[in-house]
Image (tube, rainbow, N blue to C red):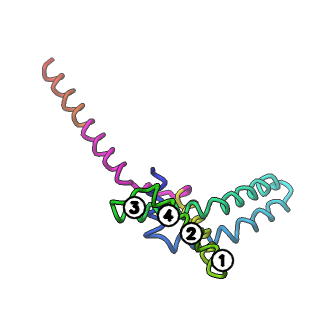
Amino acid sequence: SKFTYKAQEYMGKHILKSIGIGLFTLIVMPIAAVVLILINSTAGIGITLIPIYMLLLFIANAITAIAFSAMLCNRSKGMKFPIVLVLITIALWALEIIPYIGTIVAFFSILIGMGILLQVIFSKNKTISKGEEDIEKINEKIKENIEKSEGKEIEKQ
């Protein structure tokens, strides 16, 4: 899907940016929610930010696993995405239950996942995946054929 293509791009090329955005979100979003709640006119927005923040925290690990799996499958063509996703998820879980190391792995997994998700949602640049590029080429050929056929019809008349 488009999400996996964009996620693996942010996982590979822009990993530091993803970590930075995740760290920024992890720190700023709860502070912003509290400030918005303290201001009477924006309390509803602040209260809405809290469950959104919690949702981000819950799905961040899954986003990291999806992005890492997509990146691995993209680099080695023989791998099947669902199998790699299950294996990566189990590996992340296994690393996270190790004392001390697990806390660090979980922290960075959350940072990366939050950063990737927010970049995919709020990205202004439209990255074209391989599948979309092929579809665009096919659409261009169809348009050319329609224009040619319309030109032939006009010549006949």
The three-letter amino acid code for the residue at tag 2 is Leu
The three-letter amino acid code for the residue at tag 4 is Leu
Q: Quadrant of residue 50?
A: bottom right
The three-letter amino acid code for the residue at tag 3 is Cys
Which mark sits nearer the N-terminus, 3 or 4? 3
Which span is picked out in magenta? 121-142
Q: Is residue 82 above or below residue 9?
A: above
Q: Are marks 1 and 2 in contact (CB under 8 Å)?
A: no
Q: CA distance from mark 3 to mark 2?
A: 17 Å
Which mark sits nearer the N-terminus, 1 or 3? 3
How packed is label 2: few (under 14 Cα within 10 Å), some, or many (20 or more)?
some
Label of residue 87 in the image: 4
User: Where does residue 86 sit, x and y in percent of width and height?
Assistant: 51, 59
Q: CA distance from mark 3 to mark 4?
A: 12 Å
Residue that carries the numbered disc 3 in the rendered image: 73
Name the image quarter holding the C terminus.
top left
Name which residue lies at 44% across and 60% down: 70
Q: Secondary structure at mark 2?
A: helix
User: Where does residue 24 sit, x and y in percent of width and height?
Assistant: 64, 71
Label of residue 92 in the image: 2
